[in-house]
Image: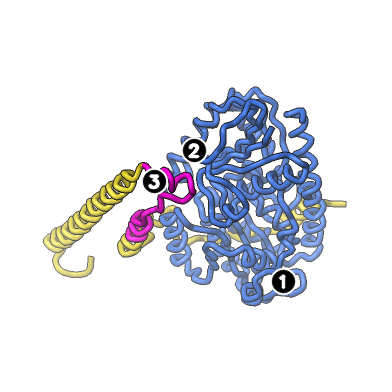
Chain colours: A yellow, B blue
Amino acid sequence: MSTAREMMAEIEGKSTVGHVDFPVTFFEINMMTAGSNEEYIRDILKNIHEHGTVVPQYVTLREKIAGLIFGFYINHSVYQQNDLHVNFNRVFDEIENNRREIAELRDRIVELHRARNGAGEI
Amino acid sequence: MKVYQILTTVAYGDAVSNDCLAIGKLLEEKGYKTAIYAENISKSAEKLGVKKFRLLPKIRPDDIILYHLSTGTELNKLIKKFNCRKYIIYHNTTPPDFFVRYSGRLTRLCYKGLEETKDLKDSFDGGFCVSDFNRQQLKSYGYKCNLTVRPILIPFEDYEKTPDADVLKEMGGEATTNEHKIKNILFVGRIAPNKKQEDLISLLYAYRQLYKDDPVRLILAGNPDGMDKYFDRLKTYAKELGLNDIVFTGHSSFAKILAYYRSADAFVSMSEHEGFCVPLVEAMFFKVPILAYSSTAIPETLGGTGILLEDKDPSHVAFCLHEVLHNKELRAKMIEEQSARLKDFSYENVAKTFMDQFKEFTGI
């Protein structure tokens, strides 16, 4: 008795498989345009929120005792947190700068195009 | 003597965690003193007694470590230092190439994972591999220790739990008892480039072009966390093709996953990298006929059952899918063969295999 795979091979042998043309392929989907800038910024904000949450340090009894003895770790954690925020602000500035540059370049492209081809749709 | 299982992450729903928890339970049932330690633990795993790796007590020379390896981690370096018998449980690491376009962090992690796996070749007294594919990979990395193969330990009684009623209703009810007007095509797996969800989207487009009067619904059940760029690209691709009704479930509860399986008319995988692929076994359990692209450990897990696809041409896959959905004789044969294959993965069989291998390795 035939196995399912043999049955399928037999069906395929007797049939003609149609062909479908695709208007677009996955490789043509540009990753940068897959999500809007707003979505990227939303994601970054989400990350900041997650990383910005101070993780409670002293969970177990052993840690609590150690925390009492070596309380300076609290300060250490706060410093780390502040450093993180500074870094995130730098990333934000970078994004803003990039967006401004992209907008300027887009305007320049439009300007050059119109200078060569006159007004109209690009 | 105590048996310690050590791994990077124990979280809800992933195959490595489930395997680790099932082994822990099995060892306990057999009377061994055992514990699980992980770097990252979800809240639900904490309730199950999994402890933070940093709380690992002093390991004695007569203790045994079972080390689950599936990614790049600091543990891969630390594990070498333990002066006791150590056994690798190898789940495979996804090749980093898949992630290059989407995540620098994951690319680095996977690259590190592969390099560290190679670097650990002389560090273990033996190894348990969840597939022969994984075993061959370790051998190619120069592992000389005894390497055995046993499938992932799956406690199937969990699958008998009640499925989410709302999802089940929304999907048209159980596939085994309802003739669906809209057939449900399911894939279960996190949203990740190696799983190739884009090929399933292409399949849906081709199917709708070829079989206009045969409505189907594509359900991509998987968590997109950490894969935002890939997920965005998938959604844009679907939108460009005019496929606005694909069900991206996101992170789902276990009850919802059960409902998707129970309502599925076919399970299709286009994945290009699997060390074992638990969802195939799950589909067998829920009597869902499987079509899967032949890659890595997939042919081995299917064991001659399901329809194995040698190419990814969407028109050809759509043709095969149409047959599976409508050819009752073929469908019945597939389910019969898959059910027979499922017995190889029964908890009793795999538990016995594991314990035999464990005793042979350790002599205890």
Looking at this view, name the residue that lies furthest to the right: A1
Cα separation between marks 2 and 3? 31 Å
Judged from the image, the secondary structure of the residue bearing numbered disc 2 is loop
Give the class, few, some or many, for how many residues have Cα within 10 Å of label 3's Cα (few <14, many ≥20): some
The residue to which callout 2 is attached is B72
From the viewer's perspective, is the residue at label 1 or at label 3 nearer?
Answer: 3
Q: Are marks 2 and 3 on the same chain?
A: no
**Residue B91 in which image quadrant:** top right
Rendered-image quadrant of the C terminus of chain B: top right
Tell me which chain the residue with mark 1 is part of: B
Q: On the picture, is B321 further left or further right than B120?
A: right
Cα separation between marks 1 and 2? 40 Å
What residue appears at the point 38 percent right and 46 percent down from the top-left corner? A68
In this view, the residue in front, B312 or B293, is: B293
The residue to which callout 1 is attached is B174
> What amino acid type is highlighted by mark number 3?
Gly
Tell me which chain the residue with mark 3 is part of: A
Q: Are marks 1 and 3 on the same chain?
A: no
Pinpoint residue B240: horizontal percent, then vertical percent: 44, 65
Is residue B192 shown in magenta? no
From the viewer's perspective, is the residue at label 2 or at label 3 nearer?
Answer: 3
What residue appears at the point 76 percent right and 69 percent down from the top-left corner? B176
The residue to which callout 3 is attached is A67
In the image, the segment drawn in magenta is: A44-69
> What amino acid type is highlighted by mark number 2?
Gly
Judged from the image, the secondary structure of the residue bearing numbered disc 1 is loop
Q: Are marks 1 and 2 in contact (CB under 8 Å)?
A: no
What residue appears at the point 82 percent right and 57 percent down from the top-left corner? B336
